[in-house]
Image (cartoon, rainbow, N blue to C red):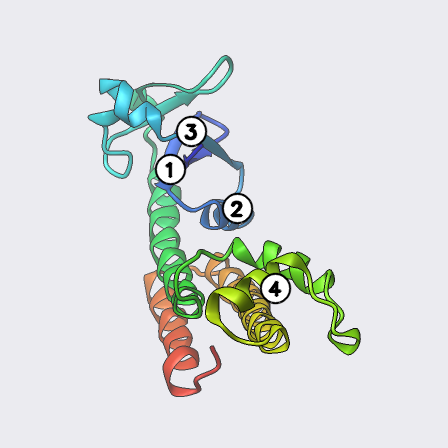
Amino acid sequence: MNFRFLILDLEIEAVVCITDSAACANSLITGLLNTKSVPVPTYYWNRFPDWKDKNFDVDFIKLTDDTGPEISNLDRNLITGEFLSKRKKAISRRNVLMTVERYLEIPLLNSVDYFDNSINFYIKSELDGSSPEQSKYSAGIIEYADMLSIAPDQAFNELKFLFETQSRLKIKNLAVYKKYSERINQSKDQSELDQFLKDFYKDCFLNARF
């Protein structure tokens, strides 16, 4: 099931912003007081007109999540300067976090030819079930070798290289995302967010760290 994530102001049950990324949602609530992330299945936007017609970044919306997610218009008296400031901060941080996340995903997507990253689990299982020193290989390794008309040891080495490359990228991306999400959550205004994004791009392209 696919989800979208609403960031909710706990004091007034008002939606401050929306994101399609669980990582972004979790990062946002660590830097915004009295907020929580509410996952909502994406089919709500397809089945219910009230959800489909709402712009959650512009409209003032209340979310009731007691017996399931229900939305309604937020009472005007609850739209205070404090809430508007929190919403502006959340949207600005979300936009930068999503940019960081997108750029971190590019190396991972470019490191595989066909399958998504979940294949790492299966590759690891096949590697663990093989013993090159004893010329013993799992059924998956042998099938891979037969399909490509290569020796099992070459197949093992190719899959090991793919697995290690993916694993290093994921660990590095985790560290980078943690570094910049913490800085983003400490930002005071848009100028600081812009500077953090410039620093991130510098790491990406000039220093070629990831």
Badge 4 crowding class, 10 Å Cα cut-off, few under 14, some 14 to 19, many 20 or more, is many
Disc 3 from disc 2: Cα separation: 14 Å
Q: Residue 171: horizontal and vertical position, in percent?
A: 59, 67
Q: Which label lies toward us, 4 or 3?
A: 4
Q: Which residue is mark 4?
A: 141
Identify the amino acid type marked 3: Val
Which of 176 and 190 lies nearest the eye of the viewer? 176
Residue 151 relative to residue 113: left or right = right
Q: Which mark is residue 16?
A: 1
- 154 on left or right of 83: right
Q: Nearer the viewer, mark 2 or mark 4?
A: 4
Q: Position of residue 97 (x, y in %)?
A: 41, 57
Between the C-alphas of marks 2 and 1, the distance is: 14 Å
Could you tell which of marks 4 and 3 lies nearer the N-terminus?
A: 3
Q: Earlier in the sequence, mark 3 or mark 2?
A: 2
Classed neighbour count for the residue bearing mark 2: other residues with Cα under 10 Å, few (<14), some (14–19), many (≥20): some
As drawn, the label of residue 26 is: 2
